Amino acid sequence: MERPVKHAACALVLFATIGSAAQGLADGLTLATWNVADLHHETGEPLRNWSVAREDVDYSRLAATAKRLDADVIALQEIGSPAALERIFSSEDYHLIVSDRYVPGSEMLPPEERDIFTALAISRATFPKLPDVRTVQAFSIQHVALSRDGSAESIRPTRSAMQVDFEHEGQKISFLNVHLKSSCHQYPLRNVEDQDFFTGRAFRSRFDCRTLKAQLAILENWIEARHALGHHVVVAGDFNRRLNLVHRNPTRHEDFWAELNDGTPAGLELSKGPEGKDFVCWPNHEKRFEEHIDLIVADNAFLQLFASVEFEKLGLGHDDAPEYADWDRKRLSDHCPVLLRLE
């Protein structure tokens, strides 16, 4: 029997950050991001060895969430193929584009050889003609590390980003969909730790942190380059970084965000959301994330064009359904959508 959905949502109205300069000069726009967690196109078949197989009811519930977003541009992560994307987003309502890194037919390879990709869903009602979309390969860098058991060298590419350039009310906007390197959610980046301070043992996440640090430099370059060309910037996606984290040492800032939003060059300041902790996504699960890693970042000059700026996180519902207990919540996703509503 279908259980009722709890439409949990967490919203932050961002007036304090961007100040009182909001003039309401532009019509409304909604931007979103959602990591759909190893989305495969086949019912009962996991995308990768460690993925969870989905049933038809899961795809129906995912499609219901996709419809709830009702956004103009949606950044998507962990998409296995265009066919997977079409199982939850309507191609009649959205232009559906998967990263150029996707190789047609690769979703039919053995699970250990399949991959995940960034993708976009762009509203046909808002954009009857597809805007300029391109894959930004610079973010797909070679991650050099050790295998999980530490016995061999492992070299594999990280995910590429996707860029959409469009105009809204005469304003040029560059929207970037990112899925950055995982496993360095809060460790230092300014000086990457090579070994554990307390035990002296080699620090496993040093490899991940160096790769994320390299992607941070690329992201900062992208933001500043688009800004210099006269574009407003919005970056949405899975940052794999707890940008809202407050450290036990109050003198040490969250250095990813401090580097990205350093106040230079003059006139370029950024805001992010949702702020605070995550009390929305799978609130009844013990192993849930307490810090947001799925976020949207935008330049303040862009946000000031609108009278209302709201960052919102949507719960997927079915929080108490036994079929989604513990890691089985990945049958929907262990991530929840984030929206930026501009009115």
Image (tube, helix red, strand yellow):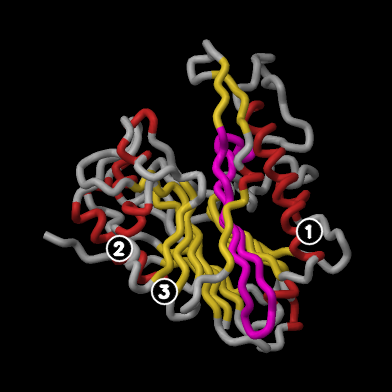
**For the residues bearing labels 1 and 2, Cβ distance under 8 angstroms:** no
Nearest the eye: 215 or 109: 109
Mark 2: give few (<14), some (14-19) or many (20+) Cα within 10 Å. Answer: some
Q: Position of residue 99 (x, y in %)?
A: 50, 51
Q: Position of residue 125 (x, y in %)?
A: 43, 80
Callout 1, which amino acid?
Answer: Glu
> Is 339 positioned to the left or the right of 196 in the image?
left
| Quarter of the picture holding the C terminus | bottom right
The tag earlier along the polypeptide, 2 or 3, is 2
Q: Which mark is residue 70?
A: 3
For the point 43% across and 67% down, which residue is it?
Answer: 95
The tag earlier along the polypeptide, 1 or 2, is 2
> Is 199 positioned to the left or the right of 28 in the image?
right
Q: Which mark is residue 63?
A: 2
Q: Which residues are magenta?
A: 157-186
In the figure, residue 158 lies in which quadrant?
Answer: top right
For label 3, the SS is: loop
For the point 61% across and 36% down, which residue is it?
Answer: 184
For the point 33% across and 72% down, which residue is it?
Answer: 92
Q: Position of residue 118 (x, y in %)?
A: 49, 51
Magenta segment's dominant SS is strand
Q: Which mark is residue 110?
A: none
> Is 267 positioned to the left or the right of 33 in the image?
right
For label 2, the SS is: helix
